[in-house]
Image (cartoon, coloured by chain):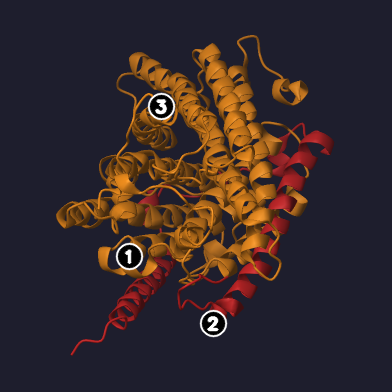
Amino acid sequence: MAGLLLSGTYDTAGFRTCPVTGLRLHQSVERYVKLFALTAVVALLVGGISAIFVALTRWEVIGLATLPAFYKWLSIHAWNLLIFWMVFMEVAILYIGGPLVLGRPLPLPKLAGIGYAMMLGAALLINHAIATTEAPDNAPLLTSYVPLPSPPLFYLGAVLFIVGVIIAVLPFFVTIWQEKQEFPNRTLPLVTFGAFITAIIALEALLGGLITYVPTLLWRIGLIEHLDAAWYRQMYWIIGHGSQQINLAAMITVWYFLTHVVGGAEVVSERLSRVAFVQYLFFINMGAAHHLLADPGIHTSWKHWNTSYAVYGAVLASMIHAFAIPAGLEAGRRKRGFGRQGLFGWLWSAPWGNPVFSATALGIILFGFIGGISGVVMGQTQINLTWHNTLAVPGHFHGTVVLGTTLTFMGLVYFALPVLFTGSGAQTLGTPSTLLLCGDHGAGHNHDALPRLTLWRAAAPSFGNEFSGYGF
Amino acid sequence: MSFPGTDFSFATAAPLFAIFGVAAILALIAGASFLLVAVGTLLLGKRVDNPALVMPPLISGGVDDDKPIHEYSMQGTFTLTLVFLATFVAIYLINWYLLGRLWAIG
């Protein structure tokens, strides 16, 4: 393990030149990128094992797990895949987008180490708390809605994980500050700019997470008598959906990076792409309000403002990226003389056999067609009524988080294997694996409007919690 | 699945769950194969001295003129974008139609 992290030949200043990207890489950055990315892959393994129990229980012909065990597996699935796989990888992406692309050493590496240790410890704590949940506590799922109690160690783990991520992100911000101090008039590269926006969105989400989970921990251990469920839901979704906005911004940053490096893309209009990132900064956090569209006690005008007028600022940004990235690929490949014939010669001639490219390209297409369209449609107040609490909801977010982000991050891992870890093998099996993941998630998560967790859970005989604080 | 005291019946959803179940197994195989490739490469993969040979970089290849990038054709992307928008409109309208069928008016 240590050999994997420390491999590489560096000059006396600790730098080496990457033969693929031409970037100057400092060993301090490389080590932490590898450490965070490897941990993310382990979380993917844990989340993948739990997926066996989730899917084969939901498929009632098999019915693998009992009802309480099902919710434990579902919670482990949610936290390891939606949070740990994503966030460990995203810290690696910030270090790539920041110090690695800028050719700088990682500032405050001890802080990165402390952040990593806290994140890892908290991830283990959360998994332990979920696995050992006993009544009257409930397995938290992703949302851990108050007033349903979950184990106190779970809330403690959530707080520690959030603080750990904030600490791990600090070296990225210091990198940007140092870069601007040294070169005040130099524009940040687009990938760094995207990573910077990602980090700001992350910080907003993480602060929302502390506002949510610190009082909830205090409530669970008895120091606060009552938490209003409606308040909890509103605060929770700052991080609950905000964490998925981090995925989106990080994924798009990786799209610009990988289509350029392995596809030959050029950015057609840097200004337009940067404007789209800034739009995310101002508008995308409001999109979290779509989780509250069916909630009582919230005024319709608030719901409409956030999920209609404001969120379209973010949707427009996504439309810009959805055009800019393939357009950059087309123009860049035509300029370099790849597949100039016909309307789609540039696309057919692209390096589809390279899993880095195929994972990225299919991630872009499937994210847009399945995750993106379903998200905008279901985020619309009236249509939301027919989608709310149905299997269409996990259908949507598997379209975004699996077909989009996971596929893209898998492409990034395939890229890192020969470039950072200098090992080969991904080329031969990577592409079939990528295609398979696309095929089945496209087929398996379509809109089947069945009641999901809440109704199923309400039918469980052990459901005895009070809803007096729900705010009806 | 049944809910005591309700009229819910999931019989019509059975074929969808069959598709879901088979697809979920395929997803698990795909995820496992990714992990196998990634971890296998790390632990057993051949050491690559020059990754540029495994992953040919396209950043600097084949440029033969000084035309600015935005002057190259993007018609293929424009066509794909139109297909995307048409799909978007179709799904949006279908969902309004389905919503409209929930309540009879008049």
Mark 1 or 3, nearer chain start: 3
Decide if residue B43 is on the left or right side of residue A104: right
**Amino acid under disc 3:** Gly
Q: Marks 2 and 3, Cα distance to the nearest angstrom?
A: 46 Å
Q: Residue at x 45, y 74 (%)?
A: B6
On the question of residue A303 being in view, the answer is yes
Q: Residue at x 69, y 37 (%)?
A: A417
**Residue linked to disc 2:** B12
Q: Which mark is residue A222?
A: 3
Instruction: Please provide percent x and percent y for residue A234.
Output: 30, 43
Front residue (pair A278, A377):
A377
Instruction: Please provide percent x and percent y for residue B7.
Output: 46, 78
Chain letter of the residue carrying label 2: B
The colour one sees for chain A in the rendered image is orange
Label 3 Cα crowd, 10 Å radius (few <14 / some 14-19 / many 20+)? few
Q: Residue at x 81, y 33 (%)?
A: B47
Label 1 Cα crowd, 10 Å radius (few <14 / some 14-19 / many 20+)? many
Chain letter of the residue carrying label 1: A
**Residue linked to disc 1:** A384
Say which of marks 2 and 3 sits in front. 3
Q: Residue at the bottom extreme?
A: B106
Q: Quadrant of residue A327?
A: bottom left
Q: Marks 1 and 3, Cα distance to the nearest angstrom?
A: 36 Å
Same chain, labels 2 and 3: no
Label 2 Cα crowd, 10 Å radius (few <14 / some 14-19 / many 20+)? few
The colour one sees for chain B in the rendered image is red
Q: Quadrant of the N terminus of chain A?
A: top right
Decide if residue A28 is on the left or right side of residue A234: right
Instruction: Please provide percent x and percent y for residue B99.
Output: 31, 77
Q: Residue at the left extreme?
A: A301
On the question of residue A272 being in view, the answer is no
Decide if residue B64 is on the left or right side of residue A323: right
